[in-house]
Image (tube, rainbow, N blue to C red):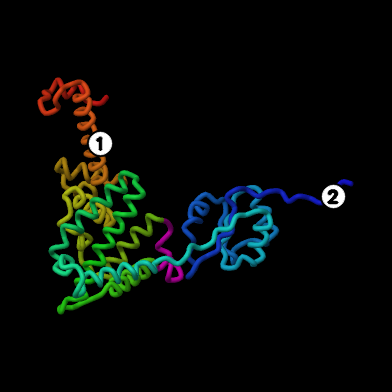
Amino acid sequence: MTSTAQVAEPIQSGSAVVLLGPGGSVPGAAVPLLRTAVSVYTTAEAPSPTTLAEEALSGSVVLLTEDLDEPAATALLARGASVVRPEPVHGGTLLDAVAVMNRLRSPGGCPWDAEQTHESLRQYLVEECFELLEAIEDGDRAALREELGDVLLQVLFHARVAQESPDEPFSIDDVAAELVAKLVGRHPHVFGGGDPEVRDARSQEHRWEQLKQQEKKRESSVDGVAMGQPALALAAKLVQRTARAGLPPDLLPGSPLFAAAARAKLAGDDPEGLLRAEARQFAANVRTAEQAARSAGVDPAGMDEPDWRRFWPR
């Protein structure tokens, strides 16, 4: 006896029902799906369940929902759409990190930690930031995780030192609260019901600078630029700020070094990162040439120009 039951046609891979997290947050695992989907809907915007399921037959469809039992969600799930659930709420372990930092600075804790000041910790903050940059450039995920922790340590350390200060003390909670207020205030298109000034990532970047200038009551487009940063990064930051303010490029300094940094930044590149990558490659070439010399029985410390050219990597 032949069955007359019909098997539902499979929907396109990449179609998914994304269960939103607290505050309507999108799970991190759903971001790649959102970027490649042909259509993305919320339950309020989605077409009828039948139409939605049919659309998923010809292209990947992602539905954002707070309820998996909602009709549009069940229609997609019945056709084989995957489910992306919100991650566990993170941040609880940060309280442990704060507690450890407090213990280290308290009586009976670590004598070295107890002696540190904002000034004495400056060198470590710079070092840890550079080590984090190196981990990013190397694509080393384990090192990235470790170095992020070391940078976080510096934040916790400085906040604890500030908490103990008799002059305008503040705590890690004050630091976090100010950050939250800043992020919310500078993203009105996310938290404020929409912002017509924001259409894409580039317009958001411009809007961020506008809101920052209004918030801090800055009188100049270059106010707030850290003048103590490395010169190449400083030049690039100044070019970025003035370009957003509409400064004509012909008014930029014409010296070769500044001009090179300006050209890179205006082209959308990071001159500091580009130069660091070039320097890292140069250092790697030097090591390769020296190793090749050793393998050939030549002492690298005694190489002359012909030797360097002989062993230089092609």
Name the amino acid type tagged 1: Gln
Looking at the image, residue 268 sits to the left or right of residue 24; the answer is left
Q: CA distance from mark 1 to mark 2?
A: 67 Å
Q: Left or right of 228: which side holds 3? A: right
Q: Quadrant of residue 129?
A: bottom left
Give the magenta-colored segment's residue range. 188-200
- 194 sits to left or right of 66: left
User: Residue 210's spot in the image, x, y percent?
Assistant: 31, 64
What percent of the width, then of the height, locates residue 34?
51, 54
The residue positioned 17% from the left and 54% from the top of the image is 229
- Residue 314 quadrant: top left
The secondary structure that most of the magenta stretch takes on is: loop
Residue receiving disc 1: 281
Q: Residue sitting at 22 percent across and 28 percent down?
A: 291
Give the answer, above or below, for where 209 lies relative to 254.
below
Label 1 neighbourhood size at 10 Å, few (<14), some (14-19), many (20+)?
A: few
Residue 226 against residue 232 in the figure, above or below: below
Give the residue furthest to the right. 1
Q: Can you identify the residue that label 2 sits on?
A: 4
**Position of residue 1 measured from the top left corner of the image (x, y, whole percent):** 89, 46
Element under disc 1: helix
Mark 2: which amino acid? Thr
Q: Residues within 10 Å of mark 2 (few under 14, many from 20)?
A: few
Q: Answer whether residue 132 is magenta in the image.
A: no
Look at the image and say whether residue 189 sits in the magenta stretch: yes
Total tally of numbered discs in the picture: 2
- The earlier-in-sequence mark between 1 and 2 is 2
Q: Position of residue 36 (x, y in %)?
A: 52, 49
